[in-house]
Image: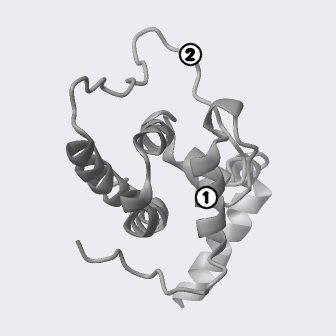
Amino acid sequence: MISSKILNVTRQLRSKPGILQSFSRLSSSDMIDPPEDPVFTIPRPISREGEDLEQRKARLIYQSRKRGMLENDLLLSTFVAKYLHTFTPTQVDLYDKLINGPSNDWDIFYWASEVKEIPEEYNTEIMKLLKLHCKNLNKESRIRQPDL
């Protein structure tokens, strides 16, 4: 009974030109850049002058775990658990710019998984290490964030 109603609605929608076609154009594979808007601007990262290295690493661990999308939470939290303690101050700076510079978290995910080309400013040794980490050559389980 319910499935026949769904089929009828689907048939009706298909018969009306433009309705389903407009939805199909909004697939997730399409990259949509937001228009420039003087009222609504994307905030830039806060400059944190005078932050010592340990405090900065603690902030980056937190920011890597709390991205707002599960894919990056898992990818970045496992990445920092594995590599952040070995980073030099320069590498910490590069990682900070990588996760706080782009306005869209999907960009980081697409760059790391090699779906989109990486802009020159983010194509650093840290990005190369993140791409290698994303490939998961050792087949590590990454279904949850590492313990703190």
Label 2: which secondary element = loop
Front residue of 147 and 15:
147
Residue type (three-letter) at the residue carrying disc 1: Leu
Residue beneath the point at 63% across and 30% down: 121
Residue 69 placement (x, y as % from top left): 42, 58
Quarter holding the C terminus?
A: bottom left
Question: Which quadrant would residue 70 be assigned to in this image?
Answer: bottom left
Q: Mark 2, residues whose alpha carbon is within 10 Å: few (<14), some, or many (≥20)?
A: few
Q: Which residue is mark 1?
A: 129
Return the residue nearer the eye: 143 or 34. Answer: 143
Q: Residue furthest top?
A: 38
Instruction: Please state, as top left, top right, bottom left or bottom right, where the N terminus lies in the image.
Output: bottom right
How many other residues sit within 10 Å of disc 1, few (<14), some (14-19) or many (≥20)?
few
Q: Report which quarter residue 68 is drawn in.
A: bottom left
Q: Position of residue 53 (x, y in %)?
A: 27, 42
> Which residue is situated farthest in the bottom direction here?
1
Answer with left or right where residue 83 lies relative to residue 111. Answer: left
Q: Is there a contact, CB below 8 Å, between mark 2 and mark 1?
A: no
Residue type, numbered disc 2: Glu
Q: Position of residue 13 (x, y in %)?
A: 69, 59
Q: Give 143 or 21, whichever is nearer the viewer.
A: 143
* Spatial CA span between label 2 and label 1: 33 Å
63 relative to 7 in the view: left or right: left
Residue plotted at (23% across, 48% down): 54
* SS assignment at label 1: helix
Q: Nearer the viewer, residue 20 or 140?
A: 140
Residue placed under numbered mark 2 in the picture:
36
Q: Does label 2 or label 1 sit earlier along the sequence? A: 2
Q: Is residue 63 above or below residue 52?
A: below
Residue at position x 20%, y 44% in the image: 55
- Give percent across and percent down for residue 12: 70, 63
Q: Which dot, 2 or 1, sits closer to the camera?
A: 1
